[in-house]
Amino acid sequence: MLYFSKLRIISISFISLFFIVVASSNIFKFDNSLLDKRINLGLDLQGGSYLLLEIDNSPVIEQKLQNLTIAIKNYFKEKKIKIKNLKISNQTLFFSVDDEFKEIIIDEFKNENSNINPYYPRFKSHQLDIKEEENTFKLNFSKQGLVELKTSSQDQALEIVRRRIDEIGTNEPNILKRGNDRILVELPGLDDPMRIKSLLGKTANLTFRFVTNTGQDSFGVEKLQFEDGSPDVFVSKRIIMSGENLLDAQPRMDTETNETVVNFTLDRVGAKRFGKATATGIGKQLAIVLDGKIISAPVIRDTIASGSGQISGGFTFQSATDLALLLRSGALPAPLNIIEERTVGPDLGQDSINAGIIALIIGFILVILFILFKYRIFGLITNFTLIINLFFLVGILTIFEATLTLPGIAGIILTVGMAVDANVLIFERIKEELKNEKNNLIAFDSGYTKSKTAILDANITTLIAAVILFFMGSGPIKGFSLTLGIGIFTTLFSVYFIARLLTALYVSKHKKKEGLL
């Protein structure tokens, strides 16, 4: 029946008032932490920076092949099979054998149950080309192997990019995959992306290695540059410890030297390695190498067994903060190259906001006038419900601090249209009921009840489309589907609780009046 208990009336009034206050927090400032929330504006509305990053997987492929080289050498050494001319060129591993071993090696590689597969599972679907006249074998990644490697690199890079950006505190960044070797980064409100670009452009591959006294390149030794331009030195290729052993890194001011340093803390394995290396290397220089350049090479004065240390290198506080951030977030699996960059100015974003608001106001006014003209007092109830419905929608977006984009505004405008559609269906059904039923209460109640199926069908099908768009779409499509989906629920609530309550109150007072609708 068209009846609402006092408890339901109080509940509906409280819920409506709550969402009105929450939505108002976008305009007015409240001290309460629950109400001190805002809807964030997307890149297309407030401006910001857009970066498209491409992952350079070449070093990863080279590293994997280098690992395979060691595995193959060890494997065939155990089998007393002599291989020669083992080298890597153009992302392909080459090696040759004498005639007596040729058939044995072919069988080993072609046999799926061969013990060589556990050495390097990713090469299980390898391509093996044999040049019989030279007894040369060529081994490289298959297409499937490359796809798996790129996907793995992309997943790792995405997570590390997210960590680095979150550490800076960028407001509502949008970080998405593009293909299997690209990452899209949208940074709303960020007009100068230079610091972000600098942080994302560094692989942050940290290693600790001893400086050697040799005066030339030799096996196991390489020549590296200092980041500050100091003379080059030769360092051992043997890695004592890597950035993977770091638990934390923070910028600090050294009170003794009055310079900014980076303090780091190691995990148990790293602490053990570092303690052992410093115990045996007293008097030696320990090179701290970041992305192929030496940032510091202090002389070891004593054993460091505490699991913590310090990196110095003439840092400013900003550079020390960025270095600590890079070390905390971890090394990228492969270098990232910025292949596209755009900066959207706030003026363009403001134009979009103004255009969206004008469209919403014009559409809202036209709808209000039409409904008011068509249904008189019930049109007024409908228009009031539409306004409350918008408060509900904006309030829910505010609670979750959602990011509003231009397509999101389009979703809100569509919600207004769907809310009107539901009310039109109800009132037209009530008109049909009034032709056969003289009791206004029964006619209005029947109108709400019998139109429910049609309204639910229309809204459920739209909701299904919104859900599909949300999970299969990206960026702006998600924004549109999110506001549309939330709008469906707020519309049903406002129509069947708020509008029905106001209609019930009016009809109850004028139940004997003819021509109500």
Image (cartoon, rainbow, N blue to C red):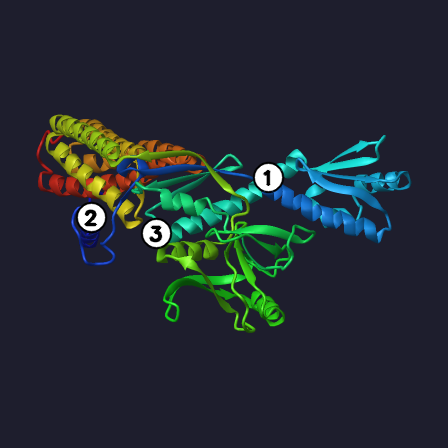
Res 297 seen here: yes
User: Are the residues flagged by discs 1 and 3 in contact, CB closer than 8 Å?
Assistant: no
On-image quarter of the N terminus: top left
- The answer to whether residue 189 is above or below residue 517 is below
Q: Amino acid at mark 1?
A: Ser
| 329 and 203: which is toward the camera | 203
| Residue 279 place in picture, x, y as percent | 60, 72
Q: CA distance from mark 2 to mark 3?
A: 34 Å
The mark lying in front, picked from 1 and 3, is 1
Amino acid carrying mark 2 in the image: Ser
Gap in angstroms between the C-alphas marked 2 and 1? 58 Å
Image height check: is 330 above or below 344? below
Of the numbered discs in the image, which one, if any, rests on residue 466?
A: none
Q: CA distance from mark 1 to mark 3?
A: 31 Å
Q: Amino acid at mark 3?
A: Gly
Q: Position of residue 73 (x, y in %)?
A: 77, 49
Q: Earlier in the sequence, mark 1 or mark 3?
A: 1
For label 1, count other residues whose C-alpha is less than 10 Å away and answer few (under 14), some (14-19) or many (20+).
Answer: few
Residue 225 place in picture, x, y as percent: 53, 50
Q: Earlier in the sequence, mark 2 or mark 1?
A: 2
Q: Earlier in the sequence, mark 2 or mark 3?
A: 2
Q: Who's the residue at 26% across and 45% down the image?
A: 39
Residue 58 — which label?
A: 1
Image location of residue 397, percent across then percent down: 28, 45
**Vertical placement of residue 165 versus 178, above or below:** below
Q: Which mark is residue 169?
A: 3
Is 501 positioned to the left or the right of 116 in the image? left
Q: Secondary structure at mark 1?
A: helix
Q: Secondary structure at mark 3?
A: loop
